[in-house]
Image (tube, helix red, strand yellow):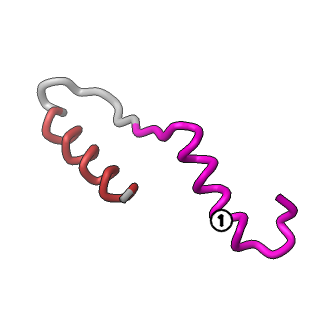
Amino acid sequence: QSLRALENDIRDWIKTWNDDPQPFVWTKDADEILDRLASYLDRIPGAGH
């Protein structure tokens, strides 16, 4: 899901580049980042979280 959203955002950015050249910025909110981090830590034995 996250990869698909990133791909869509990049495609939209490319479409508008010639009209309004801006750096590409893609962000996640803190909850999304922490949820993803927690899923990785669950896989690490002894992570102590």
Q: Please state, as top left, top right, bottom left or bottom right, where the C terminus lies in the image.
A: bottom right
Q: Is residue 49 left or right of residue 25?
A: right
Q: Is residue 45 magenta?
A: yes
Magenta region, residue range = 26-49
User: Which element type, helix, strand or loop, lies under badge 1?
Assistant: helix
Q: Say which of 4 and 17 sits in front.
A: 4
Q: Is residue 5 above or below residue 15?
A: below
Q: In the image as oriented, which residue stretches furthest toward the top? A: 20
Residue drawn at point x = 65 percent, y = 56 percent? 37
Where does the image place residue 9, in percent across and percent down from the top left?
A: 27, 44
Q: Say which of 36 and 10 sits in front.
A: 36
Where does the image place residue 45, in percent across and percent down from the top left?
A: 81, 75
Where does the image place residue 48, in percent across and percent down from the top left?
A: 87, 62
Mark 1 neighbour density, 10 Å: few (under 14) some (14–19) many (20 or more): few
Q: Please state, as top left, top right, bottom left or bottom right, where the N terminus lies in the image.
A: bottom left
Q: Is residue 16 magenta?
A: no
Residue drawn at point x = 46 percent, y = 38 percent? 27
Please, what is the three-letter code of the amino acid marked with disc 1?
Answer: Tyr
Q: Is residue 49 left or right of residue 20?
A: right
Q: Is residue 45 left or right of residue 30?
A: right
Q: Is residue 13 above or below residue 34?
A: above
Residue drawn at point x = 15 percent, y = 33 percent? 16
Where does the image place residue 20, in percent across and percent down from the top left?
A: 19, 24
